[in-house]
Amino acid sequence: MAGPNQSLDEPLGEGGEQLHEWVVATKTWRERHGKSGGEDTPNDEVIRESSDRTGATVMGRRMYSGGEGTWEDDPNADGWWGDEPPFHHPVFVLTNHAREPVTKEGGTTFTFVTEGIGSAREQATAAAGEKDVLIAGGANAIQQCLSAGLVDEIQLHLVPVLLGGGVRLFDGLGTGDVKLELTRVIEAPDVAHLRYRVTR
Amino acid sequence: MAGPNQSLDEPLGEGGEQLHEWVVATKTWRERHGKSGGEDTPNDEVIRESSDRTGATVMGRRMYSGGEGTWEDDPNADGWWGDEPPFHHPVFVLTNHAREPVTKEGGTTFTFVTEGIGSAREQATAAAGEKDVLIAGGANAIQQCLSAGLVDEIQLHLVPVLLGGGVRLFDGLGTGDVKLELTRVIEAPDVAHLRYRVTR
């Protein structure tokens, strides 16, 4: 999920940016960011599919800003997703510190949820309508959702890079918490996309 | 690679047998063990390919018998691979304790190597002829080979089961030790087979 020593300069930890290189290299991503070039590969299909299916996103506080504690003391309180974040739908941020929603360009509104994962799920499900709710990360938010039985499906984007430490997706889960069934495998440049149904 | 609390009763640790269920369920494996039934799936192709390509196997002492220390004190000194082990080619066992080779039925001879991974590699390469040398495990033997730059290719058989602890394949490797390039992905029942070329 991330390399060692996460910081504001390296939100994904040392070397962690390599985990997302396959996204940034796609034709789809480049077009959305006003760049030409790039090849249309199975990676593009995976990104388009996720965009089409997702109606709301849930993320942890650190995925939003990298900070913790009160918002007044967070040097990155506006988040690092820029003026037009790549979500284009409602995003629900798990935090212990209440705050008014933040509206960005392109249809992304960040709503800050202080009542825990259950409330975030309810709000996100209502906002998503017929579409899916994506638990984007970080690892801790995903683990909370898995432990609480809130996850129907896991999509792994397995990139062959050894970071020598950092954050693991499946840490802290007991053997009885989650059962997985492999439902789809896509081979793409530099990444294997693995989809699992969660059963309990 | 294995679940927690490995023992003679549970050589792959608690729950670890689940990692190999895909093998035991194949038509190929069943036929080799005198059983009928089973479906011929991509898992069978993976097993046949590995059998065809492999001319010699290297493994750690614990993968051979689960024991450690002198052979006189190892209650499982004859190994747990049975009278006709599934290798059918020379096997080189890494150990600190010298011992005469053990010959089993069906073409499997276990040779015990006390001079370290470099010597095991040399002997296995000579025995394999034109075929490949397989570093079968455990994790420690594989990590030694990876660190020493002896591995050309990794084939992962990724089974969707959470064991809640145990032995990790890529533990203890620095970021510079290994670079991987995804070269093949096979979707099969209950397992994703991922092949990587190792570059440094």
Image: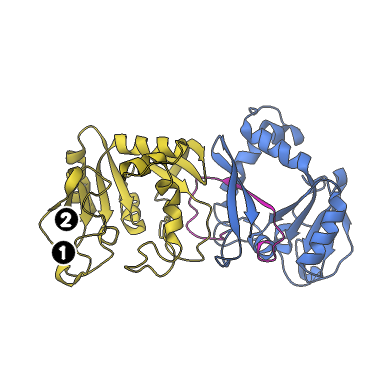
Chain colours: A blue, B yellow
* Chain letter behind tag 1: B
The image quadrant of residue A12 is bottom right
Image point (17%, 69%), residue name: B70
Seen from the viewer's position, the closer of residues B89 and B173 is B89
What is the quadrant of the N terminus of chain B in the image? bottom left
Q: Is label 2 in contact with label 1 (beta carbons under 8 Å)? A: yes
Q: x and y percent of residue B131 in the render?
A: 25, 34
Image point (17%, 40%), residue name: B127
* Magenta highlight on residue A155: yes
Q: Which residues are magenta?
A: A146-168
User: Tag 1's secondary structure?
Assistant: loop
Seen from the viewer's position, the closer of residues A111 and A192 is A192
Q: Is residue B91 left or right of residue A128?
A: left
Q: Which mark identifies residue B140?
A: none
- Label 2, on which residue? B112
User: Tag 2's secondary structure?
Assistant: strand
Q: Is residue B191 left or right of residue A139?
A: left
Q: x and y percent of residue B8 in the render?
A: 31, 68
Image point (55%, 57%), residue name: A3
The image quadrant of residue A72 is bottom right
Work out how far the residue at label 2 is from the one at label 1, CA to CA, in angstroms.
8 Å
* Magenta highlight on residue B80: no
Seen from the viewer's position, the closer of residues B187 and A46 is B187
Q: x and y percent of residue A16 in the render?
A: 57, 52
Q: x and y percent of residue A183 in the render?
A: 61, 44
Residue A16 appears in view: yes
Residue B150 appears in view: no
- Label 1, on which residue? B97
